Amino acid sequence: MSPRLTTDDVAHVARLARLNLAPDELDRATAQLTGMLEHFADIDALDLSAVEPMTQPYPLVNVMRDDVPGDVLDRDEVLAAAPDADLAGGRFRVPPIGTPQ
Amino acid sequence: MTRTVTEIAAGVRSGELKAVDVLEQHLAAIDAREGDVHAFNLVLADQAREAAAAVDAAVAAGNDPGPLAGVPVALKDNMCTRGVPTTCSSKILAGWKPPYDGTVVAKLAAAGAVTVGKTNLDEFAMGSSTENSAFGPTRNPLDTTRVPGGSSGGSAAAVAAGFAALSFGSDTGGSIRQPAALCGVVGVKPTYGRVSRFGLVAFASSLDQIGPFTHTVADAALALQVVSGVDTHDSTTIPEPVPDLSAALGRGVAGLRVGRITDLPAGADPDVQERLDAAFAALAAAGATIVDVTVPAFTYGLTAYYLIAPAEASSNLARYDGVRYGLRVAGPDADSMFAATRTAGFGDEVKRRILLGTYALSAGYYDAYYGKALKIRRLMADDFAKAYASCDVMLTPASPSVAFEVGAKAADPLAMYLCDTYTIPANLTGDPAMSVPFGTGAGGLPVGVQVLAPALGEPVMLQVAAELERSVA
Amino acid sequence: MTAAWTHDGYELVVGLEVHVELATRTKLFSASPNRFGDEPNTNIDPVTLGLPGALPVLNRHAVELAMRIGLALNCTVQRCTFARKNYFYPDMPKAYQVSQYDQPLNVDGYLDLPDGSRVGIERAHMEEDAGKSVHVGGSEGRVAGADETLIDLNRAGVPLVEIVSRPDISSPDQARAYVTELRSILLAIGASDAKMEEGSMRVDANVSVRKPGAPLGTRCEIKNVNSVRSVGRAIEYEARRQIDMIEAGEAVQQQTRHWSDADGRTHTLRTKEDADDYRYFLEPDLVPLDPAAEWVESVRAALPPLPAARRAALAAAAGLTADAEPVAVLVERGQDGYALAVAEAGGDLGRAIVHVQQAFAEAGEAPAVSPADLAKLTALETGGQLTATQAKTVVGVLLERGGGDAGAIAAELGFEAVESGELEALVDAAIAAEPDAWAKFQAGEGKAMGALVGYVMKASKGQADGKQVTAILNARRS
């Protein structure tokens, strides 16, 4: 654990999370995250090889519902609440997906 | 005068009390002190008056409005309320009105409760002081230079200040129990899956639970009874029927075994430790057996939590992208718009946790961080199960200290995280836990004792809490 | 087997990922309707929209249909879990897709194709569909130079099964056969309407090339393949593109490419350096799915006979091989049951298969001509009362009229069988009338038969059975 966390690592993670960090913010975040990961290194001392991960607090299985339609939302209300929408065509509007290479 | 939930509901149902009168008393308290306390993001005075009038009309017509008839209730502003802004104290959801009610919200309305407002929280429930709110901090009503705790600081303060007889918060790492302790009220985190999360804005899906703040243990039992139960909208709710949670409240603790965790992490202030010792003594005097137990994994809880919770949060908060609802900041293309929106819309703590969580899940690091944390979780659950083989409940501090000053920990995120040292494990295991006020510590500020019980052990947990409450009354 | 594909000494390695929309009434995790073609954003609820506080609840019927697919593909159905696949895209309401990762529902199956080859199925797992983005502005409606993107979330949350084959496919023809056979199965079991043109079945191809015996080459994923024909064309193009690159000394880059039917080429899609870090983790809002053995067995028992089994049955009954063309055609059309019913009604299966294959393309699975009616027609053929040509005409009339008495129709048309004795006499006359043709035919010129057969047909006003005449001539020659 705790390989040295670099600003490149944090910049990469910020990009994955769609967060813009200014250079000073990037430095600060790197320092803070590094500190946290160092603190969390206490678990490196444990031998976890024989331990199964715990993925749910309460052992439930097979929770399902019948294939029966339920209430839908009113499109006009939903689009009115949207930041930008083509109300006539009934669709959400966003800037284009991006320029291909 | 502060009436209990039990008293109000009984009085309104019988016609002895009018819901509108009860409400006005609470609205008056809000008028008097909300300016100093800032418990609310939104006070719903008119809506509440309508609801209270409807309750009174129902009673007059010979109908029963329900077990929470006329009870003024405050809801943490991460609980979806149809047509009423639900902001999570974040700029990214400022003004957003859900088109639906969460299950708990619907149940409370069906039980006759009267919603007085949406309470302030640390943004997206991430914090232990309510200083991370985008709309300004909440102050501790007992000392407004101090924090009420967090993340459900507004809900805790609302009950402590008499703005509501009952409030609800959410608890992911201690966000009900810690503010309850700091504000001198009762706060309960139920067994994971006991209360529906449908309509609770998710922070960490495998840890979040909704729970009540009240003045008394009996009130908490009543409130829990109303909101508990399986929900077809939430796949993680427990199908087991909900027992009568109030049945054991008066039974006392004779014959019960109360666990003292001897390898509990250090860090509790001496005044808090003194109150915990007194709590053990009180229970022993009342006929309980104090049993020493160990929970070796306890000390790793913080690490596991601060890997699991941010990881889940990084995924749960990805939906805030400016496309369908909430804030949008323009950009030339979709990705730029996502980034501009999220950068402007999220506060520093939220961003910090998203970065940490994204890193913990990222390619090459999953096993070292998130994967390991899930194993710690297993160890924690196993250790707790072993401990409960020899005791019925356990006691720990709820918070390492009494309420600290506004700004005292804000500069050091790690210092703030340590506030959750004692509360986190119950979120990891999914077991129920609660904080019950047990006297005062430094500066006359309230101290809370945490009672922990095994899964679905709410009855015995409340039973012990009731005894503690009696012993300190 | 379909012909092996090689080009410049390279062989082709293809794996197909097929996404299938399930025929449920509601979505995978929400009770919004699952319908194609509705007005945009009319089939949405808090779960579909990814609203704060919304939670998924699994659709039992979707699980049943997913199990049908797995069992029809000879998979093992197992305890499984759901995972989040995290990425940002405007038509992804939660910015993650709930899918299956470590533990999918169906694993380790196979699909046998009509040509007798077998393609391994690695897994067939459940996942939710994304919404639809429409790019407005720019050229071709594609991403390049678009002014804006409009989002419809009707499709978001629709149940999908992703069927991942092993890279066992080695030719474009085999790929097309795989897709065609898979589609037949999906229709037969009622899991999906599998319409590529509507997007309820989508095919992505992973294509690489190598010299025989060499390690696997770098593969490219080809998307936007919207018809069975395009499957073949896209794979063929991509394989040659890669071979050309390798021959020119360039390395094939691992990338996702977009097939364009219009210009018949694959093109690079925008590659983002972070595109592939999906940060999979177990979906905490769902619990594991562990279908009870009784449920799995009941689904298996309720599966209808699948195309491979039906081909085998028809072939066995007709004395043909399972990969014979008429067998494949009839089963694909769903008319094998009909042909067998004709035999059941006393008809000749071989003749029935010929007629159905030739004339019943539009007749559907339950043709209006009753099996008994067609049976009678084939009996007249095999009994020698009608020639093959005459029978074909009668069949046409039967189809027009939706049935009828074959004998009566034959009489109506003036068809009379030419008795074999009469045939011998007609052949005698032909030989006498065409001595040159007869001499040439005897000398080995097969073509000379034409004149002799022609004479007999003319003399009999077309009612002689050409085949029988040929047989008589051949017998006499030797």
Image (cartoon, rainbow, N blue to C red):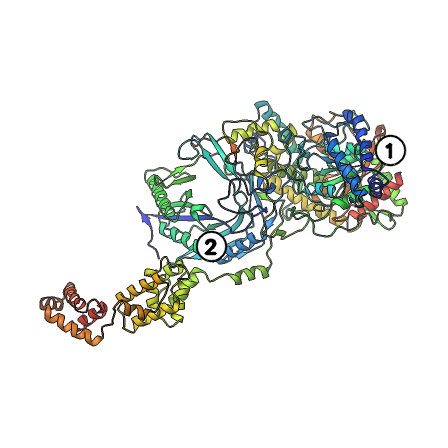
Q: Which chain is disc 2 placed on?
A: C
Report the front residue among C314 and C141. C141
Q: Chain of mark 1?
A: B
Q: Relative to B414, is B6 on the left or the right?
A: right
Query: Looking at the image, which residue sits at the far bottom?
Result: C421
Q: Quadrant of residue C364?
A: bottom left
Please state, as top left, top right, bottom left or bottom right, where the N terminus of chain C lies in the image.
bottom left
Q: Position of residue A43 (x, y in %)?
A: 66, 39
Could you tell me which residue is drawn at 28 percent across and 64 percent down? C393
Locate residue B135, reporting x and y percent.
Answer: 69, 26
Point out which mark residue B1 bears: 1
* Label 2, residues with CA under 10 Å away: few <14, some 14-19, many ≥20: many
Using residue C277 as the reference point, say whether residue C349 is left or right of it.
left
The residue at the point 14 percent across, 73 percent down is: C428
Can residue A54 be seen here? The reply is: no
Neighbour class for label 1 at 10 Å: few (<14), some, many (≥20)?
few
Give the amino acid at mark 1.
Met
Q: Nearer the viewer, residue A27 or B403?
A: B403
Residue C31 shows up from this direction: yes
Q: How many marks?
A: 2
Most extreme residue toward the right is: B285
In the rendered image, which residue does mark 2 sit on? C186
Q: Quadrant of the C terminus of chain C?
A: bottom left
Q: Amino acid at mark 2?
A: Leu
State left or right for residue C216 relative to residue C468. Answer: right
Considering depth in this image, is A69 or C174 the residue closer to the camera?
A69
> Where's residue B238, x and y in %?
70, 50
